[in-house]
Image: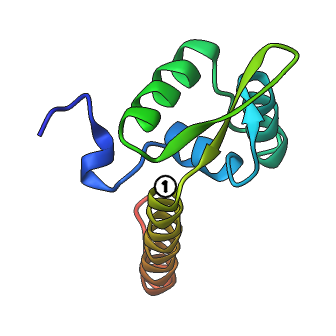
Amino acid sequence: MSKANTFETEQLTDPAYYILLSLLKAKHGYAIMKYVEDITEGQVIIGPATLYTLLKKMAQGGFIKHTGEESDRKKQYIITKKGFELIENEVMRRVNMAKHGVNVLNEEAQSDYEE
């Protein structure tokens, strides 16, 4: 598997995760970046180079597609069924990861730590 195609692992990078989430409704590039920044309260900022590289890879993989509509001459993208299944699985994977972390932290909170 090529390192360049992280979608084959079905474990998304944080930028890919947020881009797919943003495309549940059609958006153009700037709107995607703004949406991600807004929903993460500024904790995640995706730059144009990362965004357009991932959009190209996602489109090639069949996870998103152009809507065929353009807003102010900007291409709009939307998630496909394949992309929706991927993001749905990724959300559940991340929820489970968070549960594992909480469980371990709760168990270890009883331990003494060296200072």
The answer, for residue 18, to whether it is visible in the render is no
Q: State the image coordinates of residue 101 (x, y, percent, origin top left).
A: 46, 72
Q: Say which element carries label 1.
A: helix
The percent position of residue 13, horizontal first and vertical second, equals: 44, 42
Task: Please indicate, yes or no, whether residue 22 appears anywhere in the rendered image.
Answer: yes
- Figure check: 23 above or below 112: above
What color scheme is it? rainbow
Residue positioned most to the right: 72
Question: According to the image, label 1 marks what residue?
Answer: 83
Tell me where residue 80 sits by quadrant.
bottom right
The residue drawn where x is 50% and y is 80% is: 99
Q: Residue at x 30, y 40 (%)?
A: 6
Residue at x-position 76% and y-position 50%: 25
- Looking at the rendered structure, the kind of residue marked 1 is Gly
Q: Residue at 54% of width from left, 13% of height from top? A: 49
Q: Please tell me how many numbered marks the rendered image carries.
A: 1
**Closest to the observer: 95 or 66?**
66
Q: Quadrant of the N terminus?
A: top left
Residue 85 in percent (x, y) is at 47, 66
Left or right of 9? Residue 75 is: right
Residue 34 located left or right of residue 79: right
> How packed is label 1: few (under 14 Cα within 10 Å), some, or many (20 or more)?
many
